[in-house]
Amino acid sequence: MFTIDFTGEYAAFFLFSAIMICGAVLMIMLEKVVHMVVSMAAVFLGLAGMFVLLEAEFVAFVQVLIYAGAISILMIFGIMMTKHQQAEQAPVKPLKETLAIIGSLSLFGLLFYAIRRTTFPEPLPFQPGEDNTMAIGMTLYTGYMIPFELLSVLLTVAFIGAIVMAKKEAD
Amino acid sequence: MLPSYLTMAAILFCIGLYGALVKRNAVIVLLSIELMLNAVNLNLVAFSKYGVVPALTGQIFSLFTITVAAAEAAVGVAILIALFRSRGTVQVDEYDEMKR
């Protein structure tokens, strides 16, 4: 199970996972809120690199555009428009923090145990198609037409709702 | 290679869960939720390459997840700004009207 052959994919995987774990842990550890958002951007970029490794180039670029671009900027605006000076000074209740650590560590242990115990069958060769973006577009506009349209309606409704909620009341 | 990706996603998910439970700033709680969604995306894309029957469906699913996550982030930040306007704080443990 632990046989690791040092291929190029493994080296790149190791690099990206190091970036992502560093970013995520820094997000937990840092003091200032803006620094946390910037370290999350590192996680998003590392994840995009991992998608390229998995031959999902279109998803990787969507990841860079939506997460590393839009959502990070949105969060920074959210921080800017709210009060953020008193950054995390009073620590949370120690009981709650201990319970959260125990809970997330035991969840990780459970997942890790399950992943290591499972024997994954040898996959068939992956055919991403000549052009990943073209293949995704073909699939999206043939088999997933209805979900795609529903999703665009959902996105429109969500953004209109966000504007209405964040708008300053006139009175 | 699949177990490595799954373990990586599990690590990200657990860090996100811890952040969502412990952090007091509501923006960071939203970011932690995004981190958990990203871990799920990694699982979907990893299974779309290394699953028993590799197909593009996993990537399509992850695109749908990304879209819903973008909508969720926008609505979340909007609610946060509205809450901040009415309460004057973004610390999640001060939103305790329903406990009193």
Image (cartoon, coloured by chain):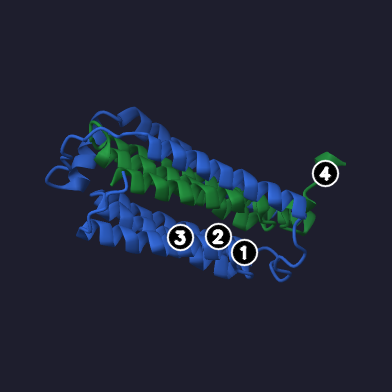
Tell me, yes or no, whether dots 2 and 3 are on the same chain.
yes
Q: Is residue A34 above or below residue B84?
A: below
The residues tagged by marks 1 and 4 sit, at their Cα atoms, a distance apart of 23 Å
Q: Secondary structure at mark 4?
A: helix
Can you identify the residue that label 4 sits on?
Answer: B97
Residue B79 shows in this picture: no
x and y percent of residue A109 in the render? 51, 43
x, y percentage for residue A161?
57, 43
Q: Amino acid at mark 4?
A: Glu
Q: Residues within 10 Å of mark 4 (few under 14, many from 20)?
A: few
Label pair 2/3, CB-CB below 8 angstroms: no
Q: Quadrant of the C terminus of chain B?
A: top right
Tell me the number on the disc at residue A21.
Answer: 3
Mark 2 touches mark 1? (CB < 8 Å): yes
Q: What is the number of the mark on residue A79?
A: 1
Q: Chain of mark 1?
A: A
- Residue A123 position, x and y percent, is 21, 35
Query: Which chain has been coloured blue in this picture?
Result: A
Q: Residue at x 60, y 60 (%)?
A: A78
- Report in which chain the residue with disc 3 lies: A
How crowded pointer 3 is (Cα within 10 Å; few <14, some 14-19, many 20+) is rated as some
How far is disc 2 from disc 1 in space, using C-alphas? 6 Å
Using the rendered image, report if marks 2 and 4 lie on a common chain: no
